[in-house]
Amino acid sequence: MAHEAPLVAALRGTRPDRLPIWFMRQAGRSLPEYRELRVGTHMLDACLTPDMAAEITLQPVRRHDVDAAIFFSDIVVPLKMAGIEVEIVPGRGPVFEHPVRTAADVDRITSIPASAVIDASEPIREAVRITTEELYGRGTPLIGFAGAPFTLAAYLVEGGPSKEHMRARAMMHSDPESWNRLAGWLAEISAAFLGIQVEAGAQAIQLFDSWAGSLSRADYRAFVQPHSARALGSVAGVPRIHFGVGTGPFLDDMALGGLADAVGVDWRTSLADAAAIVGPNTTLQGNIDPAMLQAPWEVLETHVRDVVESGRAARAHVVNLGHGVPPETDPAVLTRIVELVHSL
Ligand code: CP3
């Protein structure tokens, strides 16, 4: 590419002419063209069908003119690729046939080598290749991603979605040895998934630790941070984003000692406060409140302007939501936000 894309420049710490914006969960149910394409195909089958995954990845880029594509997949896809029985139940989330709760369960699952993910990687590589071919002409980078060990464990130990992730947090204290083996193995699985996407052409990566906000700072540091650092640090040569919800109290720890070029901030923490916490060496990503997408345009516009203003305190800023696009969002609102941000 002739010059650096605005997203990559901002992640690397400079302020490009065009303020970059993209949306977590931009590829998905808010788009009628997505819902149409997905009829009759299970979520995880769609993820492993290259032309479908590529098409869904591209839909929001064409429609909204966002500054990045995020690869259409899911945090549990590498586990499925490793042969683990998992389904995504519509309206609920990932559900595992065999929860991983005891030391014996941990033995069983960690006996699967991370190379199993690599062995099953061809559909992912193919989808990334198709996607980046079309994106290249637009100069839009593709973000590859993976789930962080804690968020994956929150589903795996419980067997499905949970509110406070009690079983995973309990395992840290009741059987720290098993916890560390499980989280270490999940770090390897996520590292493999990130590596596949980058080798095939992704130009940035994001590690999603969506549920890390349920942890205390002390538990985050002792039981989670080293494993996340291993996953995110495994991939070199592209900028790295680390995202969590409710992680305001330990945003400095989320920077992983500089391994993360950018940290995601949810709507609870202002970007000015976040900048004071993370300091001058970390880009911030966020933090439009997803609830504001339902508000009258004047209210939303004021909020978006405030987010951009607050973001000036950071070394650089990638505009995004504080969490994913809710399925009921009117996609025209997202397009209008992109136009507004690009005009600022
Ligand atoms: O547009 C994008 O952001 C790219 C694709 C993407 C999906 N999931 C697609 C998806 C990404 C980056 C994810 C990550 C993911 N998956 C996370 C971390 C990000 C976050 O939102 O916190 C988590 C926690 C999951 C687990 C998961 N998968 C949940 C909670 C759900 C929702 C279940 C439901 O139906 O409400 C999924 C399914 C899922 N992943 C959908 C999509 C588009 C919806 C499935 C469908 O359309 O049927």
Image (cartoon, rainbow, N blue to C red):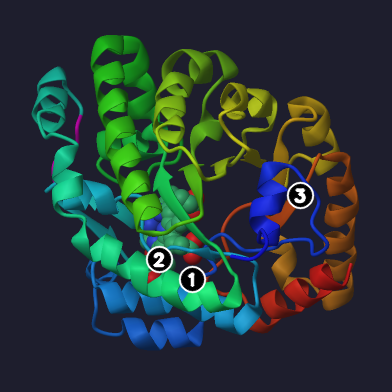
Residue 72: mark: 2
Left or right of 147 in this view: 2 = right
Q: Residue furthest front?
A: 2
Up the image or down, 68 lies above or below 254; here it is below
Q: Amino acid at mark 1?
A: Ala
Predominant secondary structure, magenta span: loop
Answer with mark 2 or mark 3, whichever residue precedes in sequence.
2
Mark 2 surroundings: few (<14), some (14-19) or many (≥20) residues within 10 A: many
Q: Quadrant of residue 268?
A: top right
Mark 3 surroundings: few (<14), some (14-19) or many (≥20) residues within 10 A: many
Q: Is residue 109 magenta?
A: no
Picture coordinates of residue 310 (x, y %)?
88, 47
Q: Nearer the viewer, residue 290 or 4?
A: 4
Q: Determine which residue is flagged by label 1.
A: 27
Answer with mark 2 or mark 1, whichever residue precedes in sequence.
1
Question: The magenta stretch spans which residues?
Answer: 96-100
Which corner quadrant holds the N terminus? bottom right
Q: Determine which residue is flagged by label 3.
A: 317
Q: CA distance from mark 1 to mark 3?
A: 22 Å
Cβ of mark 3 under 8 A from ligand 1 = no
Picture coordinates of residue 255 (x, y %)?
62, 29
Q: Amino acid at mark 2?
A: Phe
Check if mark 2's residue and mark 1's residue have beta carbons within 8 Å. yes
| Ligand 1 position by quadrant | bottom left
In front: mark 1 or mark 3?
3
Residue at 76% across, 49% down: 317
Picture coordinates of residue 212 (x, y %)?
51, 33
Answer with mark 1 or mark 3, whichever residue precedes in sequence.
1
As helix, strand or loop, the secondary structure at mark 1 comes to loop
Q: Amino acid at mark 3?
A: His
